[in-house]
Amino acid sequence: MKITYFSNSQKFLYDFQHIIRAFYPGAEVKFGHGGDIHLEAYFEEMRVFLKLQTRDKTIQKDFILVYDEHESKRIFGRNLYDLLRQETKKDLPWGILTGIRPTKIVYPLLEQGLKEEEIYKFLQEGYYISDKKSKLLLRVARNEINILNKLEPSSACLYIGIPICPTKCLYCSFSCHEMTRQIKSLLGMYTDSIICELEKTYQKIDENKNRIVAIYFGGGSPAVLGIENIKKIFTNLFDNLEKNCIQEITFEAGRPDTISEDLLEYLAELNRYLNIRLCINPQTSNDNTLKIIGRNHTFEDIKKAFALTQEYGFNNINSDVILGLPGENENDYKKTIDDVLKLSPASITVHTLSIKRASLLRFKWNEYKFMDEETVNNLLDWTQYVLEEHGYIPYYMYRQKNMIGNFENVGYCKRGFEGLYNVMIMQEKHNIYACGAKAVSKFVYEGDRIERVFNPADIKLYISRILNVDI
Ligand code: SF4
């Protein structure tokens, strides 16, 4: 299906497109004219005319905006939603909410001291968010606030990015490099570049009087650097940061084929006096799906990795799973949750598949069957119920663009195992220093102004910029 939209103004253009996409997942949505369905917005000062045209009918609406920009955006979104609901007879669980950090809208309401019922009313009437999602949102926001309230304003995070993986997952849109012979030959220089960037970063941390409380080794699969390079980075961190301020170090060991005993032995040593949080991510327990999505491991490998981490005494392990993977049905997903629960990780992060433009899946979309939105929505409710039954609480959430059914990703954990870095990065109240290719630092200024600093995504370019060499 082809859908076009047109507006005589740049106003709310992002929301215009996003809400249409949410109603018609998988459709081609373009700015312009023509197609099976055409939507148009005409702004005349404070008045807006909205029109939806199909081959055989036209429906229209007009309404008045207000001087408050945020409220005007919601008025526009609600009117567009009403038009699309009339056409599709559908409701969206997240209503007109387009942001990727939904708890951020609840924060000020909690700070103003609004009662629970008043917050629900605002979410449901202002954003058309469903009753169930409003309740989940408020719960998660309260958990996030509890975590953030324990931090000093000077607290900050440090991200170290190693965007390299053994193979590329079908749904990956991240500028992640596959481990080729050439990339392998650059690992030593890449480590030196990270250390060089870290040295400059420590100066900034000092200038800003920040204290690093959470460190995240992400990527990619940082373990591909090899134990000697990893030790070099840790030694440099401990020589320069105040160890007793560090409350958490997360190490993404997501792909079990990258985990070695040397690495676990080294991290286990650190885990004796630091809180090391390991990520071992099955995504699914279905071996056939693992093959389809291009991960060259089985669920048996995940079980072995878990057994090994237990031998080394790790108790803070996170497992990611994805709901809606290509070819999977309700039973496959439920089996994954059951299998992961048997491993008893400290936290389980449940993602809903997102089909990103830059992913291989975007081009192979038609080759697979996917669950429909209603099934995904029911399974999200089922997941929350089952995980809570097993003692997990929802403690952070975010949304991505192009997720099946426009749903959410939720981090669940056993109490006391909340991932500090995850909450800090979502709430954008603290500085985030980031080193490595594709890393993005975020600096938060008064008035909640945020400045982002981007590193080059390409590893060769990153190395040559940092070390000032030609590669
Ligand atoms: S593990 Fe993550 S970063 Fe690596 S290829 Fe898969 S989705 Fe991309």
Image (cartoon, grey):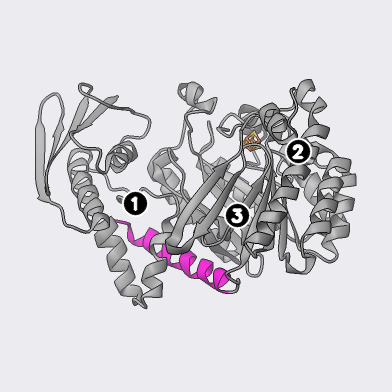
Q: What residue is shown with label 3?
A: 432
Drawn side of residue 63 relative to residue 430, left or right = left
SS at circle 3: strand
Residue at x 31% of width, y 35% of height: 24
Residue annotated with mark 2: 193
Q: CA distance from mark 2 to mark 1?
A: 40 Å
Q: Earlier in the sequence, mark 2 or mark 1?
A: 1
Task: Identify which amino acid the numbered label 3 is placed on.
Answer: Ile
Residue segment shown in magenta: 128-149
Residue at image position (64%, 48%) is 434
When the figure is inspected, residue 172 is found, relative to residue 331, above or below; the finding is above
- Residue 250 in percent (x, y) is at 71, 54
| Residue at 38%, 61% in the rendered image | 105
Task: Work out whether mark 3 precedes mark 1 in sequence or the reverse, and give the earlier one.
Answer: 1
Question: Disc 3 vs disc 1: Cβ atoms closer than 8 Å?
Answer: no
User: 378 left or right of 388?
Assistant: left
| Residue 111 in sight from this viewpoint | yes
Assess whether mark 3 and mark 2 are in contact (beta carbons under 8 angstroms).
no
Residue corresponding to mark 1: 97
Residues at discs 2 and 1 in contact (Cβ within 8 Å): no
